[in-house]
Amino acid sequence: MTSESLPGPAEPYRARFRPGVVLRAASGAVPPSGLVLLAVLSVQLGAGLAKNLFAQLPPSAVVFLRIAIGTAILVPFARPRLRGLGRRDLAVGAAFGLSLALMNLSFYEALARLPLGIAVAIEFIGPLGVAVAASRRRLDLLWVALAGAGVILLAPWGSAGGANWVGIGFAALAGLCWAAYIVLSAATGARFPGASGLSFAMIVASAVIAPVGVASGGTDLLRPEILLVGVGVGLLSSVIPYSLELEALRRMPTRVFGILMSLEPAVAALVGLFVLGEFLQIREWAAIGCVVIASIGATRSG
């Protein structure tokens, strides 16, 4: 951590205990690689917590709960600033929000049908595709082939494994939406000031997912215990990892960050095993390993 990230001796003593300063100081005690791994673990724990809600709510209702709570937390701190933006700018921001809503909805539908590690491994094809799309290196074809082999290994070719074709289809759709999310995120950031593009996209995502989420969840969405778990999902899946990733990126190269993020399918499989009791076959662990290695290779050579 640099010296600029803490208040200097000339500042009032009470400034040393502002929440942001305390959080920055606490994260400074953890190496940046540890922050990234904690962020990855937080996201997957959030997914595991959301999956436990499927016994009480359908996936679409859980998605609405997650996005709505995330929006309620984010918007007060980063209000959308739309002054001076044209229709094309607003259209890009709206498309960003639509990709966010569809990505989460399709992933949660996949999660309802697949073990966590398998769903994340298939979904990871999206960002992997973005990473190699603009490349002209022949080596990247190897990473694409390796990731494809991993997905083929995950397919239920007449086996009694935990995968099924509908779940695989939803996970693949989530990967496509993730790829669109990455591209539209950059386009939105270039048009909207600060984090207002993200908050605008979150509002759009909430509006898009609200009809199906409210219709499927009904009055159960208002149960205090459901809302409490929903807050936990929102914090673990969005607020906490986003904060940790921002702090990590201040202190480490983006390529190293990408390599560590490539471990996400493996972390998801471990969370599925120890938190959800999802036991995978050796073939499925090998498939997840293929996706992880492909992602690391694409990140290192990209």
Image (tube, grey):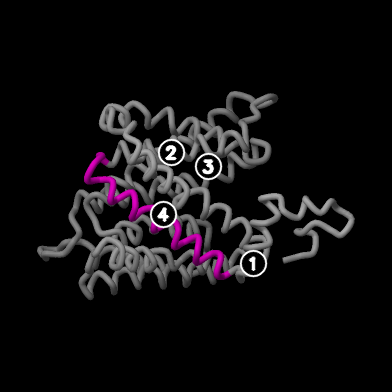
**Outermost residue, right direction?**
10
Of marks 3 and 2, which one's residue comes earlier in the chain? 2
Q: Is residue 79 depicted above or below 259 in this figure?
A: above
| Circle 1 residue | 253
Q: How far apart are marks 2 and 4 (CA)?
A: 21 Å
Q: Residue at x 39, y 53 (%)?
A: 46
Task: Using residue 158 as the reference point, say whether residue 61 is left or right of it.
Answer: right
Q: Distance between the residues labelled 1 and 4?
A: 22 Å
The disc at residue 126 is 4
The disc at residue 139 is none
Q: Residue at x 85, y 53 (%)?
A: 11
Front-most of residues 255 and 7: 7
Task: Measuring from the top left, give residue 51's x and y in whole percent.
Answer: 29, 51
Q: Which residue is drawn at 36% across and 66% down?
A: 147
Report if residue 138 lies within the magenta region.
Answer: no
Q: How crowded is mark 2: few (under 14 residues within 10 Å), some or many (20 or more)?
A: many
Q: Is residue 155 depicted above or below 51 in this figure?
A: below
| Circle 3 residue | 184
Q: Which amino acid does label 3 sit on?
A: Leu
Q: Distance between the residues labelled 1 and 2?
A: 30 Å
Q: What residue type is labelled 1?
A: Pro
Q: How far apart are marks 3 and 2 (CA)?
A: 18 Å
Secondary structure category for the residue under label 1: loop
Callout in the foreground (1, 2) = 2
Secondary structure category for the residue under label 4: helix
Front-most of residues 179 and 234: 234
Of marks 3 and 1, which one's residue comes earlier in the chain? 3
Task: Using residue 65 as the reference point, say whether residue 197 is left or right of it.
Answer: right
